[in-house]
Image (spheres, rainbow, N blue to C red):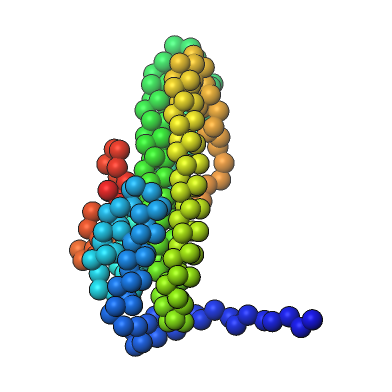
Amino acid sequence: MEEKNEAPAAPESEIRERAKKEMTPQAGRSVLGKVADFAVSLGKGAAALADRIRGVRNPEEAIKALDAQLEVNRARREPLVARSEKLYGEIAAKKKVYMAAAPVRKKILELELKGMVSEYKSLERQLSVYFENERVLTTVRGRTLELTAMGLRKVSEKEIDRLTDDIEGAAEDAEDVTDAMNDLEKAGKRRVANDSAEFAAILDGFEESALADPAPEAASRQSDDPFPGFGETEKGSGVFE
C-alpha cells in the first residue's frame, strides 16, 4: 500500500503575505475572535491579552503586536537574569566565608546572607512571571499563524471549532496541574518556614561554580508598545493583568 506524503507546511512569511492579499476582513475578524478565545483558555492572567487581540484589525497586526511585546518582555527579563547569576556567585562566595568564620562573626554574616538570599528569591519570582509571559505570548502567536493558515486553506468553521475545543481542553488541564503545583509549593514554603534548619537548607543550594557571562544591557522600553501594561511584575499580578 502506497503511503501518502503530506505537503510541507507553508513557511510563516508565505502565510503572512498571502493573508495580507487574500484574507477578507470578515475572515480576519473570525481568526482574531478564535485567537482571543484561545488566549482566555490559557489562564485568567491572559484575559487582557485577549481583549487587546480583539481590538486589532487583522491577524498581521496581531502578530506584529505580539512580536513587539515579546521583545519588551525579553528586554525586561535579561537584566534580571544577569543580576540573578551575579548574585548567585556572590552568595556562594559569602557562604564559603560564613562556613569558615568564627562563631562571633557568624551572626552578622548570616544577616548579610539572608538579605542576599531574599533578593535572589525575589528575582526568581519575577523571572518566573516573565518566562511564563513569553510562553503565553509565543503560544498565542503560533495559534494566530495556525488559524490564519487554516483560513487561507478554506477549512470549514466546524473543523476549526473542533480543533479549538481540543486545544482549549488541553490548556485547561494544564492550568489545573499548574494550580495544584502552586498549592503544593505554598504548602512547602509554610513547612520550611517553620523548620529550624531553614537557613542551612537554603544555603545548601548555593555552590561556587562557573557561571555564564551576564546578559547584555537590556534595551530601553519601547514607547510605542502595542499592548501597554504588559510586563508589569507588581506583587500579585502578571503581565496580562
Q: Quadrant of the N terminus?
A: bottom right
Q: x, y (%) of residue 193? A: 44, 20
- In the rendered structure, the answer to whether residue 198 lies left or right of residue 18 reads right
Left or right of 240, for residue 143: right
Looking at the picture, how far across and down is residue 234, in whole percent? Answer: 27, 41
Q: Is residue 90 visible?
A: no
In the rendered image, the residue lying farthest to the left is 223
Quarter residue 151 falls in? bottom left
- Residue 14 occupies which quadrant of the picture? bottom left
Q: Residue at x 34, y 56 (%)?
A: 73
Residue 8 visible (yes or no): yes
Q: What residue appears at the point 22 percent right and 58 percent down from the top-left corner?
A: 228
**Above or below, comparing residue 101 to residue 51 in the picture:** above
Q: Residue furthest bottom?
A: 21
**Residue sitting at 69 percent across and 82 percent down?**
4
Please give left or right for residue 200 compared with residue 234 in the image.
Answer: right
Residue that sits furthest to the top in the current view: 104
- Answer above or below: position of 206 versus 32: above
The residue at 54%/32% (across/down) is 205
Q: Is residue 10 above or below residue 137?
A: below
Of 91 and 222, which appears nearest the observer? 222
Residue most extreme to the front: 158
Q: Up-down: is 170 above or below 104?
A: below
Number of labelled discs? 0
Q: Position of residue 48 (x, y in %)?
A: 27, 54
Picture coordinates of residue 82, whole percent (x, y) = 41, 49
